[in-house]
């Protein structure tokens, strides 16, 4: 396995260090957390973000909770940790990885012999499994890109958004290792994950990237410079409908218009087997202050903002979903069930 250049999360054994992604690329600073409430706040305020990374952070948050309450008494500690799991579950609504990680931790907590060591082992396994899945998806996705002339990605799906290496950005890393090719990254308004995180992360690995304004994507496709759009996902329904960063749906529509292929890369922890289609995915709305220029923020202002931060791309617009268990071409429920 390659050395990971960027790490969103560092588990010290008794604290969680979180790279504050709000400060990047100007400042690379880790904050250290020793309780679950702090981790929940770090997720809600997007110090750590990206579907797999928030699941892993929440799992370590549960371990911190167990460290805090375990010595307190025989049964009481389990209830306190369960209450912290509820707090962590409320930190963000869309990425299902958060809930699947917390479900795994709860299952360990409910074992008769549960203790902090067992919870810690589970969190470390969730983290290690995610990194392994990313490397596997990197190879499977790169196989599809043989001969590609250029790629466009959206948001940040790299080491910063995962346990390490990345989902869509992992595929791009693996493809670039095989054959250098032009990589374009959308700014990804309003939070600028592409401009602040993706191009920075690629530069850490010595991979050149070209930043474009989100609104330049159609013209880029029209120019013939790219033949694939590659994105991650926050939640995938059983029929292949995929929720991802706002703007992903627009890219899929544009890609179809221009004959550009569209790849979604996500570990199976991102699949929500309980929902039939994308209509059932809760789309996070963030505060209008994240979007509005400061001059409109005063009370009584006539200007407000609508700020959904995810959208759902219908399966019909997706050429391939790449998971660590295999690739689903032209996704449908039947194809998805084959990797369940
Ligand atoms: O709001 P964010 O930055 O957490 O959104 C992240 C994304 O939408 C990513 O594309 C998605 O989580 C996949 S990351 C591997």
Image (cartoon, rainbow, N blue to C red):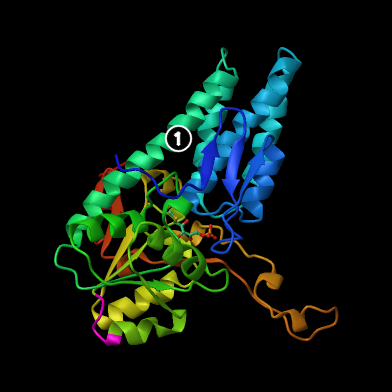
Residue 240: quarter of image: bottom left
Percent position (x, y) of residue 288? 69, 72
Q: Nearer the viewer, residue 15 or 251?
A: 15
Seen in the image, is 133 located left or right of residue 247?
left
Q: Badge 1 local density, few (<14 within 10 Å), some, or many (20+)?
A: many
Give the percent coordinates (x, y) of residue 28: 56, 55
| Residue 27 visible in the current orientation | yes
Q: Residue at x 34, y 87 (%)?
A: 219
Depth check: 85 or 236 in front?
Answer: 85
Q: Image point 69% across, 35% down: which residue? A: 35
- The overriding secondary structure of the stretch rendered in magenta is loop
Toward the left, the furthest residue is: 147
Looking at the picture, tell me which residue is in the foreground, 227 or 26.
26
Task: Give whichever of 143, 268 is nearer the camera.
Answer: 143
Give me the residue at 28% from left, 87% from top: 222
As helix, strand or loop, the secondary structure at mark 1 comes to helix
Identify whether 81 is placed above or below 331: above
Quadrant for the C terminus in the image: top left
Question: In the picture provided, is 324 more to the left or to the right than 290?
Answer: left
| Left or right: residue 136 compared with residue 116 | left
Q: Quadrant of the N terminus?
A: top left
Q: Is residue 19 left or right of residue 129?
A: right
The correct choice, above or below, for 150 with respect to 109 in the image is below
Residue 9 percent coordinates (x, y):
53, 43
Residue 215 is situated, as x and y percent measured from the top left of the image, at 45, 84
Q: Quadrant of residue 264?
A: bottom left
Q: Is residue 239 among the parts visible in the rendering?
A: no
Q: Which residues are magenta?
A: 222-226
In the rendered image, residue 165 lying in the magenta stretch gets the answer: no
- Residue 173 placement: quadrant: bottom left
Where does label 1 land, which residue? 126
| Residue lying at 51% horizontally and 38% vertically, measured from the top left | 101
């Amino acid at each position: 396995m390659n050395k990971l250049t960027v790490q969103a999360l560092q588990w010290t054994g008794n604290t969680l260090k979180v790279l504050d992604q709000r400060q990047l690329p100007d400042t690379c600073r880790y904050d250290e957390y020793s309780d679950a409430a702090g981790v929940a706040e770090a997720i809600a305020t997007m110090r750590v973000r990206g579907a797999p990374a928030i699941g892993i952070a929440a799992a370590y948050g549960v371990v911190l909770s167990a460290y805090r309450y375990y010595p307190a008494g025989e049964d009481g500690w389990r209830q306190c940790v369960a209450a912290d799991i509820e707090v962590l579950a409320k930190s963000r609504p869309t990425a299902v990885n958060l809930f699947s990680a917390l479900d795994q931790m709860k299952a360990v907590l409910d074992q008769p012999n549960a203790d902090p060591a067992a919870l810690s082992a589970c969190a470390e396994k969730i983290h290690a499994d995610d990194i392994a899945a990313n490397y596997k998806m990197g190879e499977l996705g790169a196989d599809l890109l043989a001969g590609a002339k250029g790629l466009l990605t959206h948001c940040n799906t790299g080491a910063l958004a995962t346990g390490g290496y990345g989902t869509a950005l992992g595929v791009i890393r693996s493809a670039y290792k095989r054959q250098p090719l032009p990589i374009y990254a959308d700014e990804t308004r309003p939070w600028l994950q592409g401009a602040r995180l993706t191009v920075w992360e690629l530069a850490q690995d010595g991979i050149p990237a070209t930043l474009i304004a989100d609104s330049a994507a159609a013209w880029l496709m029209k120019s013939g410079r790219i033949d694939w759009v590659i994105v991650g996902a926050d939640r995938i329904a059983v029929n292949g409908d995929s929720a991802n960063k706002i703007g992903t749906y627009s890219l899929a529509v544009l890609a179809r218009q221009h004959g550009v292929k569209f790849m979604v890369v996500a570990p199976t922890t991102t699949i929500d087997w309980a929902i039939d289609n994308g209509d059932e995915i809760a789309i996070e709305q963030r505060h209008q202050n994240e979007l509005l220029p400061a001059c409109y923020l005063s009370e009584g202002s006539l200007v407000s903002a609508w700020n959904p931060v995810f959208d759902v791309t219908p399966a019909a617009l997706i050429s391939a979903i790449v998971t660590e268990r295999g690739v689903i071409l032209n996704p449908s429920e039947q194809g998805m069930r084959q990797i369940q």
